[in-house]
């Protein structure tokens, strides 16, 4: 079974890489298989999550535990989502969907404000500017100058001239460097995935290396 799995993975990898030449029926077939398998795995994990987190605590509690009746609420809301497939009761699915969007938005906003806003402000204010210049002072100073320049770049309340113009220019270059770094990291992560698949083909499958 392990050998069969390696052969299936190798053939699937080659079929996906064939897209580098041009789109072809073999690539589309394997793409559909991949999407279908992923959907099946997602469906199984969704069922398992409902069973462990809602059904068992409500109807089959572990020994020594009481029934968690509050689990009826998410269980009912989850079932109501499937009313989407009934033409006359399609509108009912908007109720649980509203809860999902509202709670998800609240959690996302809280996380974004904390991680992308408050934490970065606090980290910038705590930068040790007056330490040993060779060790960390120059890096900290460069970071703070870049942050201030970026904020000035988005300061539109007055015309950007004089000191504001130079600050905005620093902010522009800082953002260009940051975007370039992010793009480079994305490319490197994709290259590392490619290297991993090449190692798999030459190592585990063909056993050349």
Image (tube, helix red, strand yellow):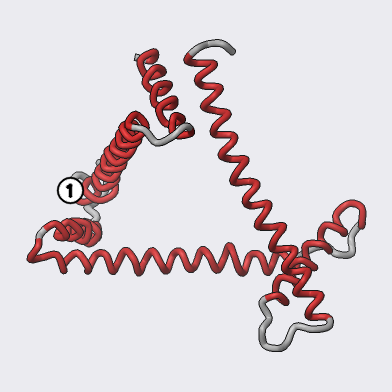
**Left or right, 202 with reference to 10:** right
In the picture, measured across the screen, residue 119 lies left or right of residue 112, that is right
Horizontally, residue 186 falls left or right of residue 111, namely right
Residue drawn 43% across the image and 27% down it? 13
Image quadrant in which you'd find residue 203: top right
Depicted 188 relative to depicted 147: above or below:
above
Residue 64: give x, y in percent of width and height: 26, 44
Q: Residues within 10 Å of mark 1 (few under 14, many from 20)?
A: some
- In the image, what residue occupies the spot 69% across and 67% down? 122
130, 150: nearer the viewer: 150
User: What residue is disc 1 on?
Assistant: 59
- Label 1 element class: helix
Q: Where is residue 166 in the image (x, y as percent from the top left)?
A: 81, 75
Residue that protrudes farthest toward the left in the picture:
88
Quadrant containing the N terminus is: top left
Measured as percent of width and height from the top left, residue 2 is found at 38, 15
Write the residue at 61% across / 68% down.
Answer: 117
Q: Where is residue 69 in the image (x, y as percent from the top left)?
A: 21, 58
| Figure label count | 1
């Amino acid at each position: 079974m392990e050998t069969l799995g390696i052969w299936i993975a190798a053939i699937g990898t080659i079929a996906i890489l064939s897209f580098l030449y041009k789109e072809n029926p073999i690539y589309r077939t394997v793409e559909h298989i991949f999407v279908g398998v992923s959907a099946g795995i997602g469906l199984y994990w969704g069922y398992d999550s409902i069973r462990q987190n809602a059904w068992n605590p409500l109807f089959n509690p572990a020994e020594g535990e009481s029934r968690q009746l509050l689990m009826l609420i998410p269980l009912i809301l989850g079932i109501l989502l499937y009313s989407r497939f009934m033409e006359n009761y399609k509108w009912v699915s908007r109720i649980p969907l509203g809860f999902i969007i509202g709670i998800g938005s609240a959690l996302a906003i809280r996380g974004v404000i904390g991680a992308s806003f408050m934490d970065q402000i606090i980290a910038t204010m705590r930068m040790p500017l007056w330490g040993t210049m060779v060790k960390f002072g120059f890096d900290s100073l460069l970071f703070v100058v870049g942050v201030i320049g970026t904020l000035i770049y988005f300061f539109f309340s007055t015309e950007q001239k004089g000191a504001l113009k130079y600050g905005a220019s620093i902010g522009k270059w800082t953002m260009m460097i940051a975007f370039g770094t992010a793009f480079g990291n994305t490319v490197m992560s994709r290259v590392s995935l490619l290297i991993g698949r090449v190692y798999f083909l030459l190592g585990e499958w063909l056993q050349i290396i």
